[in-house]
Image (cartoon, helix red, strand yellow):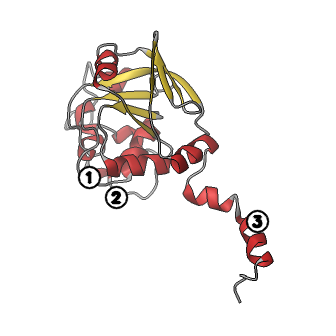
Amino acid sequence: MPEPFKVLTSQTVVLPQKSIDTDQIIPARFLTTTTREGLGKSAFYDWRYKADGKPLAGVELNTVDAESHRVLVAGDNFACGSSREHAPWALLDYGFRAVVSTTIADIFTSNALKNGLLPIQVDKETHEKLLARPGAEVTIDLENNELRFGNHVVGFKVEPFARRCLLEGVDNLGWMVDRIVAVETFERENGLESA
């Protein structure tokens, strides 16, 4: 699980295409692994590389500094298509911590939140401003559920338990493991211990 997500200030990478599906995010031929490491090099592979595997010239995803560009602003209907946990894994391994769009597929949203990637849905006006400013500096404040850039501030919603896990830097299982002593104490005090 990535580090706790509280406040992130970053430049954006803009992919304005509508209906970017999970096969474009991480093509099916790269789904043979069960590990997350190294999937970032395959993120948007068919948009970034020639058939022989050499990088395409002029593709921002091949030249941008991932350390300073951790927010992806994508076109409407982002991450539609099949459910694949590899999609948020690839985006995280590339360096992204958040994705901003007007609509983000529900299944992808669930997978992203469980893996430490914050999907943010914004209104059309905010989205258009972000699409028009590639590389803009934005601040995502998860503690206050705000996205800020320039003099623009917009609130966003995140499912409460997922938000808590992101703030703590744990996944669902990690959250439960952190509370195992409290669970065992509760079971013991209430006669619920397993035989």
User: Is residue 100 or residue 11 the one in the foreground?
Assistant: 100
Which-is-in-front pick, marks 1 and 3? 3
**Count of number-bearing discs:** 3
User: Is residue 177 or residue 41 the one in the foreground?
Assistant: 177
- Disc 1 or 3, which lies upstream in sequence? 1
Q: Is residue 107 above or below residue 167?
A: below
Q: Which residue is mark 2?
A: 32
Side (left or right) of 151 relative to 72? right
Q: Quadrant of residue 180?
A: bottom right
Tag 2: residue type? Thr
Task: Characterize the local packing of mark 3: few (<14), some (14-19) or many (20 or more) Cα atoms within 10 angstroms.
Answer: few
Task: Characterize the local packing of mark 2: few (<14), some (14-19) or many (20 or more) Cα atoms within 10 angstroms.
Answer: few
Q: What is the x, y in percent for residue 169?
A: 61, 44
Identified at 80% across, 76% down, the residue is 189
Q: Which residue is mark 1?
A: 29
Q: Is residue 134 above or below residue 74?
A: above
Indicate the secondary structure of the residue bearing disc 1: helix
Which-is-in-front pick, marks 3 and 2? 3
Identified at 31% across, 40% down, the residue is 104
Q: What is the x, y in percent for residue 74?
A: 30, 30
What is the C-alpha distance between the residues marked 1 and 3? 42 Å
What is the C-alpha distance between the residues marked 1 and 2? 7 Å
Indicate the secondary structure of the residue bearing disc 3: helix
Tag 3: residue type? Val
Q: Which residue is mark 3?
A: 181
